[in-house]
Image (spheres, rainbow, N blue to C red):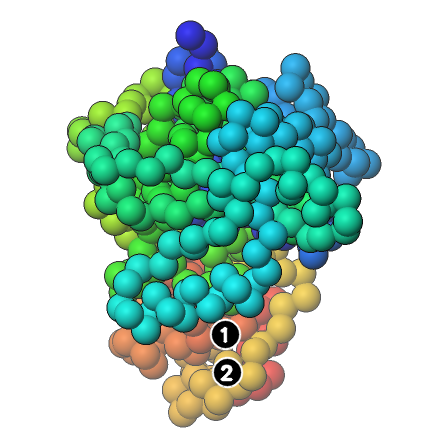
Amino acid sequence: MSVRVRFAPSPTGYLHVGGARTALFNYLFAKKHNGSFILRVEDTDQDRNQEQSLIPLLKSLKWLGLNWDEGLSLDKNNNITSKGLYAPYSQQDRLSIYKEKAMELIKTEKAYYCFMNPEEENKQKQQAIKLGKSFRVSSPYRNRDIKTAEEKIKQGQKFSIRFKTPEQKKDYKLTDLVRGELSFPSDSLGDFILIRTDGFPVYNFSCAVDDSLMQISHVFRGEEHLSNTIKQQLIQKALGFSVPKIGHLSIILDKNKKKLSKRSGSESVEHYQKEGYLPSALMNFLSLLGWNPKTEKEFFHKKELIESFNIEGLNSSSAVFDEDKLLWLNQEHIKKLSTEKLIEILDSFIKDIQTKKTELEKLIPALRSGFKTLKHSAQILNLFLQTNFELKESALKILKWPNSKTLLTKWKIFLQESKKDHLSLEDFKKFQKESKLKGKEFFMPLRCALMGQPEGIEIKLLATLLSIETLIKRADIALKQC
Ligand code: GLU
C-alpha cells in the first residue's frame, strides 16, 4: 500500500507554527516512504472569505519548503485551483459528496433525520449538568421510520442528520502510532451530527469521508483531535471504508509551559519569515518539537530530516517552543550559507542590494558568524554600507563627555598617519593603548564616531572593515558635535 498523507488546514489567514509542525511531519513521512503529500482545505465554515484567507497559508507552506504533490494549487496570479486524481480538494466544492454519503448512511439506518431544535437539545444538556452527568443527546427521532421523516422534510421542517452511534458496552479502542493502545469509555459519544440544519457537513464527517475517498494511508495531527478520531473511525467503518492509521502529535507549549499563545502574531510562520528566519532553520526547529532523532545531532537540513525521520522518534510528551533555540539554529543555518546565497536572500532586507554586491562580498565572510537573523544581518551590514552617516540622538550626549573631543582628535590623526586603506587589529590595539583611556570612556565615544550610536556590533570589526577614508569622514562628523 502506498503512503498517502495529507495536511488539511482550515483557512484562518495564516499558517500557525503548530499547523506547520503537523504539515512538516506528514511531509517528512511521505518523502521518506516515496509517498504523496496532499493538501486539502477544510473550508466548510461559510462565515469566512475562504479564498483570501487561504492564500497566505499556501504561501507560507511553500516558503517553508513543504511542497505538496497533490491538492490545492496556487498559480502566479494567486488563483487557487485543484490538481490531482481526487479533485476537488476544497471541501466547499465537495458538498454533494458528503450529501450522497450521508444518504447512504440513512438508507442503511446508520444515521437518521433528526428534527430536534437547539432549545430541546439545550434543555437536555442543562438537565445533565443539574444531575452532574456527562451530556449525551437523546434524540426521539433515532428509531423513526425514514418515510415519516421524509414527509416532514417535504412539509418544510428543518432537520439535521445524526449518526446512530452503536450502543456498546466495551470501551472504544484506538491504536495510535505515537501513543500506542488507547481506550475511551463506551458512553463518551452520543448520536453526533453529521450534517447540520444548514445543510453543511460537520468537520468530523467531511474529514472522515475525504480521508477515505482520497486513499489516505496515515494521518498525523495534533492531540486535540483525539476525541474526533473515534467518531471519524466509526463513520468510516459504517461506510465500509478503509481506516487510515493515525498518530496524534504532542502539544506545543511556550517557554512558560502554557499553550502556545497568540501574542502579537508571533505564532505564525509569516512572522518568522518577516523577522528574517531561514525556512531551513524554522523547519529544523519545528522537526524537533515532538520528534527525537535519538542522537546528539540537532542541526538538520531537509534532506537529512527526510532520511532520519521515523515514527519511533515521535513522542507524546509536550514540546516547548523555545525561541532562543530557534534563534541559535537560525544562526547556525546562516553560517552554512554561501556569501552569494546570503546576498541573494538579503534582497528584501537591504535596499538596492545589487549595487552593493562588491562591498558585501568582502563584509559578509568577516561578519557572518554574528548574524542571528536576516534582519539582524542587514542591521549590521547597513552600519558598514551607510553612505549618509548620521549620529543618533543617543550619540550626541556621549560626544559631549569631557574626554570625547581629545580622544576623537587623536583618532583622526592616527587614521591620517596610517597611510593605509584599512586598519589591522594590531593598529587598533595600538591606538587603544596610546589613547590611555579605558572601558566606557574609550569605547562609547569611539562607537558613536564609527556607527553613529553607542551600541551595536563589536567595535574592532567596524574599525578594521571600514576603509580609513570612511573612518575619517565619520570622525569629522562626530568631532563637530564634541
Ligand atoms: N481542519 C482541521 C484543523 O485545521 C484538520 C484536522 C485534521 O488534520 O484532521 O484542525
For the residues labelled 2 and 1, say whether their Cβ atoms are less than 8 Å apart.
Answer: yes
Report if residue 11 is visible in the image.
no
Residue 118, picture quadrant: bottom right
Q: Nearer the viewer, residue 307 or 331?
A: 307
Horizontal and vertical percent position of residue 154 = 77, 44
Q: How many numbered discs?
A: 2
Q: What residue type is disc 2 on?
A: Ser
Horizontal and vertical percent position of residue 296 = 18, 33
Lower sequence index among marks 2 and 1: 2
State the residue at coordinates (23%, 38%).
Answer: 169
Instruction: Check the image and report above or below for 384 versus 40.
Output: below
State the residue at coordinates (67%, 61%).
Answer: 387
State the residue at coordinates (29%, 23%).
Answer: 310
Q: Which mark is residue 394?
A: 2
State the residue at coordinates (56%, 78%).
Answer: 392
Q: Secondary structure at mark 2?
A: helix
Q: What residue type is disc 1 on?
A: Gln
